[in-house]
Image (cartoon, helix red, strand yellow):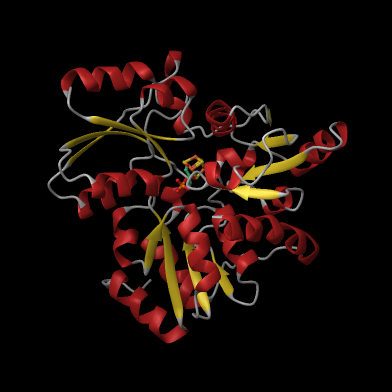
Amino acid sequence: IPEGLDLKKAIRQLCKEKDAIILAHYYTVGDIQDIADFVGDSLALARKAADTDAKMMVMCGVHFMAETCKLLSPDKTVLCPDLTAGCSLADSCDAADLKKYKEEHPGYQVVSYVNTTAAVKALTDCVVTSGNAEKVMASFPKDAKIIFGPDYNLGNYINSVTGRHMLLWNGGCHVHEKFSVDGIVKLKQEHPHAVVMAHLECKAPVLAIADVKGSTATMLKYAQAHPEIKEFIVATEAGILHEMQRTCPDQTFIPVPPEVSEGGVGCSCNECEYMKKNTLAKIYNALKYGWPSVEIDPAIAREAVKPIQRMLSLS
Ligand code: 13P
Ligand code: SF4
């Protein structure tokens, strides 16, 4: 990268030259959200990827999000600034393990969270996101036999609000599992009027005390729709605070600190290190060299796109 280059300007110029758009998730750093053509939650990003006329897109998020873009726009180049930007939740469900589990449970349909690899989606009947899970699940008969994965917390939440008995995969997100009731109660003592918002990937006790539960976009939209509420306690990855503060400058957003496990094991921050692998320099290089792009085995892609399309048609 040439010394002294204005990266933001250079990226926008490359987008123009290459007919490319930048899609960014709310958890990426503020600088990336600021230069993106579109910032959203998993559902909105998938919709945008399916709709765009641009020849190329740079998906600034994690690998499964770039795969979703490629599945929905197979003829377009989908760049992923860092192919090693994984997801602990997607990693918690291996396709071979799911295949075996399905074989052990004949007659069951598989509903998967969008945070999964294309190989897992290829074994899935319908995908959901945190933004549409309840709506999409309503299309399944109440007594349908369902395997839900990989997020145990989201599946457990759906079971609890719908009275279903889905079989739950035991996966989780290493960032969201660290939020604790104690941390929220402590903040609530300091800010008694604050409304508590939590992502559906949080554990059941955290969701039980949250006033607003949903996807990143659910929380953002709630704050935007309630200017009369002046303080929010936010239990999700801290990157979302950038868009919350940008669009709601008169409201205060307080991030919940994660609970560090005994002995200080694990990451002690409420940030997703995979999302933070996206940098302006990597975006610039991806656009300049057209690499790295996401490629999916055609046989897997053929099957994996079906449950995503089913979700999009239902939500
Ligand atoms: P959203 O669909 O709410 O953006 O969530 C994606 C995610 O990875 C949360 O950890
Ligand atoms: Fe995956 Fe968790 Fe990061 Fe979301 S926050 S992308 S679920 S690791």
Q: Where residue 159 appears, x then y in whole percent?
A: 59, 29
Can residue 239 be seen here? The reply is no
- In the image, what residue occupies the spot 29% across and 55% down? 30
Residue 99, above or below 265 = below
Left or right of 194 in this view: 68: right
Q: Quadrant of residue 308?
A: bottom right
Residue 38, above or below 266 = below
Can residue 262 be seen here? The reply is yes
Tell me how many marks there are.
0
- In the image, what residue occupies the spot 82% across and 41% down? 99
Q: Quadrant of residue 192?
A: top left
Outermost residue, top side: 262
Looking at the rendering, in which quadrant would you find the N terminus? bottom left
Q: Quadrant of residue 113?
A: top right
Residue 178, above or below 124 = above
- In the image, what residue occupies the spot 36% across and 27% down? 210
Outermost residue, left side: 250
Q: Where residue 226 appears, x then y in whole percent?
A: 22, 44
Left or right of 278 in this view: 140: right
- In the image, what residue occupies the spot 44% across and 14% down? 263
Residue 35, above or below 261 = below
Looking at the rendering, in which quadrant would you find the C terminus? bottom right
Q: Where residue 246 appears, x then y in whole percent?
A: 21, 54
Left or right of 239 in this view: 53: right
Q: Considering depth in this image, is 94 or 279 the residue closer to the camera?
A: 94
Q: Where residue 89 appears, x then y in whole percent?
A: 58, 38
Q: Considering depth in this image, is 140 or 75 the residue closer to the camera?
A: 140
